[in-house]
Image (spheres, helix red, strand yellow):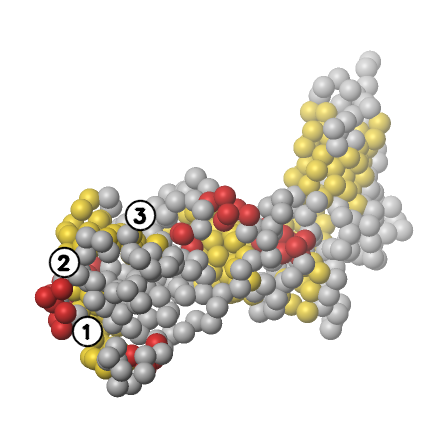
Amino acid sequence: MSHTPRIRTVLSCTVLVVALGAGATACGSSETHPLAAAPYDAAQDVAISAGGRTKADPDKPLEVTATGKGRLTDVVAVDASGRRVAGELSADGTRWRTTGPLAAAARYTVTASTENGDGGPGRRTMTFDTAAQGKGKDKRLKVTFGPEKGTYGVGQPIVAELNAPVEDRKARAVVENSLKVTSKPAVETGGWYWVDSKTLHYRPKEYWPANATVTARSELGGVRVTDKVRGAAGKPLTIRTGSKIEAVVDASRHAMTVFKDGEELTTLPVTTGKPGFATRNGVKVVLGKEYFVRMRGTSVGIAAGSSESYDLPVYYATRVTWSGEYVHAAPWSVGSHGSANVSHGCVGMSTKNAAWFFETVREGDLVHVVNSIGEDMDPFGNGFGDWNVDWADWKAGSANAPEAPPGKAPGPADRLSPRI
């Protein structure tokens, strides 16, 4: 009678020892360890030991090792929320080791698939707990997602704000890898960009799908970020997108064409910024809508009483930069709409057309300015210029990039500088 070779597997955080056999499902014992239990059967000698008296040390890697004539074919470790811990299996199948961090005060389920010397498969599933952090030992890193829950245009980036700066690149990778964004319908690819040490933006390679559900969640809770910092649990965010609304402003033609889901809705005569106050080129994301705004030249550095000074009531104002660019009603310059650029940087149009645009767009919709003599839109710090970053450069802003840059810090967000 032939005997199936036994596979002995060691599972450890400091050291977790597990003998594996085909179909084994229970943890076994020695009487000397608090985690010990009765053996599965006489043929399966199973024992578990962990760093600490009863729980595994989350600061040490998890290891699964096969001994004897068998080998490991796959190992999966997940926590109670379904977060999978990254790991690496050796080429000869004798050892698997986590490459991602374990969370403190968490329960993990480990499933190890094995193959014996005759090619027979086996599988072993077990659970273990990690110890909680010591009181007063670690600071907590918390993430808050934005924008607020609601419906947005397809250009709306997801923002992750941290409550403390993260400078170290490896620590940034730990944070970034713990922040997950999904959409239904799914996007082909997307990624995080470190704007600065406390701010990350997420966007797809292309715009979000229309009428999609986008969810951001953090798996940072309990995860070791640095020697003195662990992640805190975060509140997930779900937003929806509406139709794809994109307005293309051609400054040289003095016209704005509005598209909905790729179909042209209308072309409107407009005026844009004149020399010295030229409208910025590039893609801008609608930041908000204000039915009435009092616009004063002094708020953008124009001296009162100068030839460029103004103080005007403005209606149907759709904001696209924090520094004061709007799409708005400009009845005082209606004679120049469609023929000349006479504004101080905004896109002006008739009151009727501005009211239509105001009612058509929402936050997250797109305004794309082309053929202006102005500067390019700043990617960060003056609204959401994220879509002006080439995809290759965007990927380089990830902490997982081969040579990730430290991130470009945004300039001051001047929310009180409307210009006409």
Viewer-proximal residue among 217 and 104? 217
Q: Mark 3 or mark 1: name the one nearer the start of the chain.
A: 3
Q: Residue at x 83, y 57 (%)?
A: 52
Considering every residue shown, the one lying at the far top of the view is 1
The number of numbered discs placed on residues in the rendered structure image is 3
Q: Is residue 357 above or below residue 40?
A: below
Residue 262 position in % (x across, y down): 24, 44
Label 3, secondary structure: give it.
Answer: loop
Which residue is denoted by mark 1 in the rendering? 315
Badge 3 vs badge 1, beta-carbon distance below 8 Å: no
Q: Mark 2 or mark 3: name the one nearer the start of the chain.
A: 3
Q: Amino acid at mark 2?
A: Gly
**Comparing labels 3 and 1, the label whose residue is closer to the camera:** 1
Residue 347 position in % (x across, y down): 23, 63
Q: Amino acid at mark 3?
A: Ala
Number of other residues with Cα within 10 Å of mark 1, as a class: few under 14, some 14 to 19, many 20 or more: many
Which residue is denoted by mark 2 in the rendering? 338
Q: Whole-Å distance between the Cαs marked 3 and 1?
A: 29 Å
Which residue is denoted by mark 3 in the rendering? 210
Q: Mark 2 or mark 1: name the one nearer the start of the chain.
A: 1
Badge 2 vs badge 3, beta-carbon distance below 8 Å: no
* Quadrant of the frame with the N terminus: top right
Viewer-proximal residue among 41 and 36? 36
Left-right relation of 44 to 222: right
* Quadrant of the frame with the C terminus: bottom left
Q: Whole-Å distance between the Cαs marked 2 and 1?
A: 20 Å
**Comparing labels 2 and 3, the label whose residue is closer to the camera:** 2
The picture quadrant where one finds residue 64 is top right
Number of other residues with Cα within 10 Å of mark 3, as a class: few under 14, some 14 to 19, many 20 or more: some
**Comparing labels 2 and 1, the label whose residue is closer to the camera:** 2
Q: Residue at x 27, y 61 (%)?
A: 362
